[in-house]
Image (cartoon, rainbow, N blue to C red):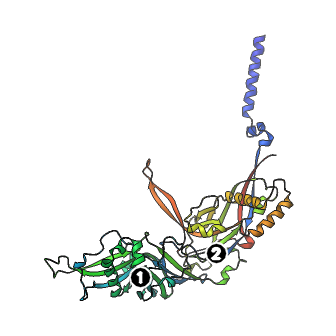
Amino acid sequence: MKAYLSLCALLFGAAALTTACNEDTTSLGADIMPEADKVFTEQLTVKVPTQTVKTGAIAARTNNSYLGSVIDPITNIRTTNGFVSQFFIPEVTLFPAREKMMTDQSGNIVADSCSMTFWHVNYFGDSLATMKVTAQEIDTEKTPNGNTTYYTNLNPEEWLKQGGEQQTASYSIFDQTQPKAQVENKANYRYFNIRLSKEFAQRILNAYYEHPEYFKDSYAFAHHVLGGFYLKHAGGLGAMVQADHLALNLFYRFRPDVANRPDSIISDVQVLTSTEEVIQTSRIENEIPSSLLDNTKDFTYVKSPTALHTEAVLPIDDIVANGHYSDSINSARLYLRTIAEENTTQKLQEAPPYLVMMRVADFETFFEKNQLPNGRTSFYAALDSKGSSKQKATHSYPFTNIAPLLTIMRNERDAGAGVQATDSESTRKAKWAAWEQKNPNWNRVAIVPATPVYVTTTDPLTGKPIKTLARLNYAFGLYGVRLAGGQTNGVDLSVIYSRFNN
């Protein structure tokens, strides 16, 4: 009898266990968790107002230098570019021994000719437009130095050498004196020449033999021999060309074997180039119609170089309202959708490949100090397009999580305003208002165009290349895009909160 009862108990227990396993267990963890430890999440969408503002000057330390003048046919912004460039001195013997060089009756070195070649690949606008450029010599005592930050509104006219070399030349992007197949082939560099005087070349050559110490490196050369050249747009409209590099060509003759063959003469050239090792600074001028700053429209502009960008006001008040003051901000997504220009057939500017977002207070120093987006106070987003050939693609810049910035702004305001945990909502608001008057840009962010610079390394395990973002430069090229938003409609910011059940 006892054995029978034990068997019945065992079967009943097994049946009960089987029944429990078949039930829904999704609330099992919640059932055993203490009520105070439960985490609740909530999603909220708030509006972010945006506006178009003038960009102003940007730190001009860049090797992406442009020359020319164009008018954007859609916005009527006129952009004119020029730049200053020094020349690199390699640590090699530049010229033959002095006794081998051709000289005049006074014993001065004789140069045959001199020119400066502007090598280029990328351009904007009309490739056949006739343009003018003036090359002006920079004074060695005023040449740029690496210890000073120069901005795109600089005035190179103040650096010019009195009585220095100055020449003007006409050019077009496609040199019509060359075969069409050659100039249109991107594998071949395009270029144009600026003829410089023979006297200028002779001055450089004589300095080489009189003061060889001035040619020991690029710094000594720039501060004692040639401070560089300012390439100034001097006329024409409709084309902008990106400089790949400049080449200073010094043509001369020499006798290779003075003792045995004094009549043997060789023509040669020494080429000095602009490289990343020397300074290049851009001068950018924009004429911007005031109508583009009308913020009653449902979009904003991003236009480069240094023309217009978008500012957004992150609505911290809305984010912490309605009982969310003590909640943790887990995620915050902001998608900036592009709007097609009204007349795309005349479109000159392409959308920038990247946009970078940072606090307005950090705007000036971000590019000046070559900072990278840190995921806390600065972020970047690549242009993303979704759609197929049958379906019109939509474009946006996805800032997938700016929650750290929202948290920093919220905590910064509380600390600055002296808010206490025991303060009522009305007390908090009064303290916030007083602090915000002294810090009007505390929740403003700038959204500007950028171009990435990557460094490629090799994975030691797989042997595959790895691209790492090394630098994010301001986009000095001609880029432009309209972003949905504005002061009235704004942009949707999706916020996800979490909190413990207290």
Mark 2 or mark 1: whose residue is earlier in sequence: 1
Estimate the x, y position of residue 347 in percent, counting from the top left.
56, 79
Answer above or below: position of 29 versus 429.
Answer: above
Which quarter of the picture shows residue 375? bottom right
Asked whether, in this view, residue 175 is left or right of residue 430, the answer is left
Give x and y (percent) for residue 320.
Answer: 78, 58
Q: Residue at x 75, y 23 (%)?
A: 13
* Image height of 14 relative to 57, above or below: above
Q: Relative to 393, is 84 on the left or the right?
A: left
The disc labelled 2 sits on which kind of residue?
A: Tyr
Residue visible at 62% across and 79% down in the picture: 342
Q: Nearer the viewer, residue 190 or 203?
A: 203
Question: Which quadrant: the N terminus?
Answer: top right
In this figure, which residue is indicated by the disc labeled 2? 301
SS label for mark 1: loop
Mark sitting on residue 227: none
Query: x and y percent of residue 381 in the render?
Result: 59, 63
* Residue located farthest toward the left when viewing the structure as drawn: 260
The x and y percentages for residue 35 are: 80, 41
Q: Nearer the viewer, residue 375 or 201?
A: 201
Res 469 visible: yes
Residue underneath mark 1: 174
Decide which of 440, 144 is in the foreground and name it.
144
Whole-angstrom CA distance, mark 2 to mark 1, is 31 Å
Q: Residues within 10 Å of mark 2 (few under 14, many from 20)?
A: many
Q: Secondary structure at mark 2?
A: strand
Residue 267 vertical placement versus 409 (above, below): below
Neighbours of disc 1 within 10 Å: few (<14), some (14-19), many (20+) = many
**Viewer-closest of 410 and 20:** 410
